[in-house]
Amino acid sequence: MHAAGYDGGSIRRSTRRTLHTAPALALLCALAVAAPARTSADAAGERKRAQLAGVHNILVVPPFFATDTIAQAAASNRQAPAATDRPASDQQATNRSRLTREYAQMLQSLEQFVRTRLPARVTTRTPFHVIDPDALARAFKATGIAPASLFQTGGKLKAGRFPLPDAHAVQRLAQEAHADAVILGALDEPRKSNGHYTFDPLAGIGYDDPSVNGKAGYFVLLGDGTEVLHAYLETIQPVSRGRRSHLLADWTDVEGLIIEDFLDELTRYTPQAH
């Protein structure tokens, strides 16, 4: 019923950056290894299609960052003394606190983007009827469940592993909202990487352009808590070029691309939307 946690090797990567090397031999090796597993994958795909065939009403729970940064920034903001009360020696700590709050605000902006983008894209790209957000809010209130409570480990990343769904909590929420299935998502904080040279034993020296990347774990469960699929996703793309920084816009693009990658996976097992 539960998927294995992200182990650093099972994540699906959608790379959208320009690499100046082409390790073709590695790709051929990967194709050779994947071929024997095709029959098993086909059977698993048919099982997923059968599970989703009866789904009409679906809950889309707003994904959230499975880290403590936003909560810590809020706590720091409440505890911060007024500017006139701060000694001059605390200026560096004050600056760090300000940067942390600004970063947390960026994360909140990304959560808001994903909160609206995901259900809209599910509506567009799948045949499912997305249950109204007001009905979802009423179900949360009636059950006393919060989005993070739908996951194990308090909805937090542990040692780089995404939290797994709590099947019982998902079942309770689905029953309250009369949902046939539920979509959940947990996000890791996005990152920015400066350009750097790389060395591959097969391809030699290469160069990776500056890029931004994001990771997420998305899950689809039936109303009884049975997991249908999980997708651990990472998207990497080049940073926007220019004299000004567009970091938030780049990170927003990455989160949007991850949603599309998730729906690419989901729609492999669903009829086309009308």
Image: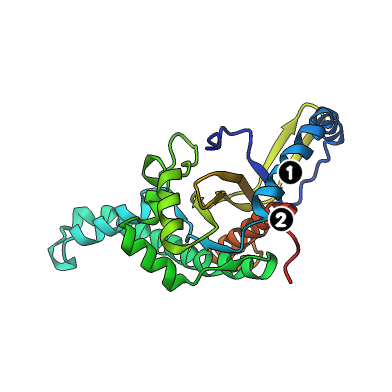
The quadrant in which the N terminus is found is: top right
* Residue 195, placed above or below residue 260: above
Q: Position of residue 166 (x, y in %)?
A: 43, 43
Instruction: Please give the name of the residue rendered at 83% of the width and 40% of the height, measured from the top-left corner.
Output: 22
Task: Identify the residue position indicated by label 1 in the image.
Answer: 45
Q: Position of residue 7 (x, y in %)?
A: 56, 32
Label 1, label 2: how far apart the Cα atoms are: 14 Å
| Res 12 visible | yes
- Amino acid type, mark 2: Asp
Dot 2 alpha-carbon crowd within 10 angstroms: few under 14, some 14 to 19, many 20 or more = few
Q: Nearer the viewer, mark 1 or mark 2?
A: 1
* Residue 43, placed above or below residue 36: below
Secondary structure under the numbered disc 2 in the rendered image: helix
Is residue 95 or residue 142 the one in the foreground?
142
| Res 166 visible | no
Instruction: Please give the name of the residue rendered at 65% of the width and 63% of the height, measured from the top-left corner.
Output: 240
Instruction: Please give the name of the residue rendered at 62% of the width and 47% of the height, measured from the top-left corner.
Output: 233
Residue 117 relative to residue 175: left or right: right
Query: Residues at badges 1 and 2 in contact (C-beta under 8 Å)?
Result: no
Task: Identify the residue position indicated by label 2 in the image.
Answer: 264
* Residue 67, placed above or below residue 267: above
Checking the image for residue 177, the label placed there is none
Q: How many marks?
A: 2
- Amino acid type, mark 1: Gly
Residue 172 relative to residue 33: left or right: left
Secondary structure under the numbered disc 1 in the rendered image: helix
When asked about the image quadrant of residue 90, the answer is bottom left
Q: Position of residue 60 (x, y in %)?
A: 52, 61
